[in-house]
Image (cartoon, helix red, strand yellow):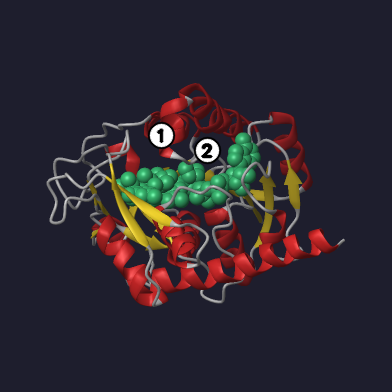
Amino acid sequence: MTVLVTGGAGYIGSHTVLALAEAGEDVVVIDDLSTGFSAYLPEGVPLFIGDAGDENLVEGVIAQHNIESIIHFAGSVVVPDSMRDPLGYYRNNFMTARNLLNVAVKRGINRFIFSSTAAVYGNPDQVPVPEHAPTRPLSPYGSSKLMTEIMLHDVASAYGMQYVTLRYFNVAGADPQARIGLATVGATHLLKIAVEAATGQRAKIDVFGTDYPTQDGSCIRDFIHVTDLSQAHRSALAYLRRGGASTTLNCGYGRGYSVLETIDAVRRVSGRSFAVQYAPRRPGDIMTMVADTSRIRGLLDWQPQYDDLETIAAHALAWEEKLFRERHGELRQAASA
Ligand SMILES: NC(=O)c1ccc[n+]([C@@H]2O[C@H](COP(=O)([O-])OP(=O)(O)OC[C@H]3O[C@@H](n4cnc5c(N)ncnc54)[C@H](O)[C@@H]3O)[C@@H](O)[C@H]2O)c1
Ligand SMILES: O=c1ccn([C@@H]2O[C@H](COP(=O)(O)OP(=O)(O)O[C@H]3O[C@H](CO)[C@@H](O)[C@H](O)[C@H]3O)[C@@H](O)[C@H]2O)c(=O)[nH]1
């Protein structure tokens, strides 16, 4: 009984693969390494390098391994990039999932966990936002995820598949032991940029929009620690294995922090100050995004361990310092070779 994880070499995927492997699950990964890193997979986890939308590749992996469920992380993830390249996002998020589902149906795999996003809600009428709130994405990224959610629902109804769609809010932090973390070069996530500034890799951080009608004028986000999120995937898998009905669940803690508060948390845990520059609003940004978490807390056996912004910031910082040392060391070695 093996779990196929697409995008398992990426940020959230690698933390989930680690959580599954540590729990004794058999896991195989398909990843094209476009933004992922094979080095972040635990030893012994087979990696198939290629496109999760390549039906021949997926068929081959399923034929070789006794796959009982699929966790689908693979995709393109940057909201502003999707504004510039909508077709790329519809291809890599929607069409990849379509092909993967086609093979899953052919091979009779009937448990599927899908990485969706709070971006499907757009600007919510109600905060915290419940799962039944209207979905009005503001970006092609959010639309591509919503279209995939709808397709998954239709496929599951037609072929007797059970699924859990997880709508992640803002994922941040790193493995508490700093074994893995967010390593994407040029990542645009707020906490990543802030810890890059705190470690001197950036001269400043821009705050995109300080004129929102919020307490301090900046946007508000609900940050979830990546390790807690990885455990939510394990809990979702257990839920499906005990026959749980298909469902859609918000993944957050239910508390919002402004962009400025988040930057302050990084300043506090790092003890370092760095320049903060006010900049215009970023196209596609949602103003306030906070999860109503009653459904996930009611349905899954899931106990978050790191529900604290400073802990999230501290883990992100510890990982960034390690990554910086590693990359700096590599550069020095290359220069002296
Ligand atoms: N990071 C967040 O805050 C966040 C929030 C909501 C949803 N999500 C979703 O979670 C999932 C994982 O995101 P992440 O933050 O770990 O990003 P990531 O870029 O680190 O991970 C994506 C992984 O998928 C791989 N990949 C991309 N396209 C592929 C393809 N066609 N075939 C095979 N592999 C492919 C990449 O190489 C990478 O390893 C994505 O679906 C994303 O939309 C992320
Ligand atoms: O240098 C920066 C980076 C970000 N922000 C702001 O910080 C907030 C959060 O931005 P970011 O970290 O880029 O995350 P989101 O745009 O909220 O999107 C993230 O969270 C979504 C779910 O809410 C996921 O779907 C996306 O994949 C993930 O990138 C936004 O208001 C940004 O404008 C800044 O002010 N300066």
Q: Position of residue 81 (x, y in %)?
A: 46, 33
Q: Position of residue 93 (x, y in %)?
A: 51, 33
Q: Position of residue 133 (x, y in %)?
A: 21, 40
Q: CA distance from mark 1 to mark 2?
A: 21 Å
Return the residue at label 1.
153
The residue lying toward the viewer, choosing from 302 and 187, is 187
Whether residue 38 sits left or right of residue 131 in the image: it is right
Quadrant containing ligand 1: top right
Q: Is mark 2 within 8 Å of ligand 1?
A: yes
Residue at x 61% of width, y 45% of height: 35
Return the residue at label 2.
76
Q: Position of residue 280 (x, y in %)?
A: 27, 39
Label 2 CA crowd tier, 10 Å (few <14, some 14–19, many 20+): some
The residue lying toward the viewer, choosing from 306 and 279, is 279
Disc 1 is placed on an element classified as helix
244 shown above or below 99: below
Disc 2 is placed on an element classified as loop
The residue lying toward the viewer, choosing from 6 and 203, is 203
Say which amino acid is labelled 2.
Ser
Answer with the quarter of the image where residue 172 lies: bottom left
Whether residue 327 sits left or right of residue 223 in the image: it is right
